[in-house]
Amino acid sequence: MESPELITFQKYAAKHRISIHSVIKKTMNGELKTVVREENGKEVTYIALPSSAEVKQTTSKPSTEDTVEIDYKKEYEALHKEYLILKTKYEKLLGA
């Protein structure tokens, strides 16, 4: 097994086009593994990216049984109905 690739918070955020704050939240939640190393007398925290072999093992194609068919027209109608209800409530509040 290869050692994981180490990358800084800033580089990870730039690579995945997310904010540094989001990267920190992911590490706090345990979604990303971190490694603390000492460089030049300072502790530096890195994100441990899995090696390409590990990524291939964990990534698999979803089976056709797991996919859920969504009836978009039905969902749209339900959302539109909820929107109209909220709109009438809002108009009543403005008129009161």
Image (spheres, rainbow, N blue to C red):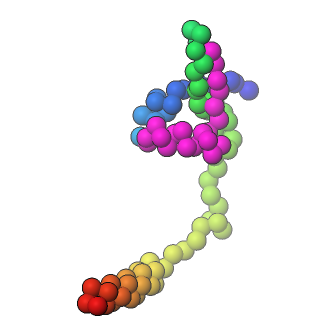
**Residue 21, position as x, y percentages in the image:** 48, 40
Instruction: Evaluate whether residue 48 shows in this view.
Output: yes
Residue at image location 42% in from the left, 84% down from the top: 82
The quarter of the rendered structure image containing the N terminus is top right
What residue is shown at x 65% (from left), y 35% (from top)?
A: 33
Residue, x 38% and y 84% (percent of image)? 86
Quick one: 65 or 81, which is closer to the camera? 81
Task: Please state the horizontal and vertical placement of residue 61, each as a whole percent of the image.
Answer: 62, 53
> Residue 3, how many percent across, how many down?
68, 24
Asked whether 33 falls inside the magenta stretch, the response is yes
Q: In this view, does 58 lie above or below 92?
A: above
Q: So how many labels did they put on this image? A: 0
Which residue is situated farthest in the top direction here? Answer: 40
Residue 80 appears anywhere in the view: no
Along the line of sight, which residue is nearer the eye, 4 or 32? 32
On the image, which quarter does residue 58 sit in? top right
The residue nearer to you, when weighing 11 against 53, is 11
- Asked if residue 21 lies left or right of residue 55, the reply is left
- Residue drawn at (46%, 80%) of the image: 75
The quadrant in which residue 81 appears is bottom left
Q: What stretch is highlighted in magenta?
A: 18-38
- Is residue 20 on the magenta stretch? yes
- 84 relative to 24 in the view: left or right: left
Q: In which quarter of the image is the C terminus?
A: bottom left
Looking at the picture, tell me which residue is in the foreground, 88 or 19.
88
* Percent x, y of residue 73: 42, 82
- Give the farthest residue toward the right: 1
Quick one: which residue is furthest to the front in this view?
A: 96
Q: Quadrant of residue 77?
A: bottom left
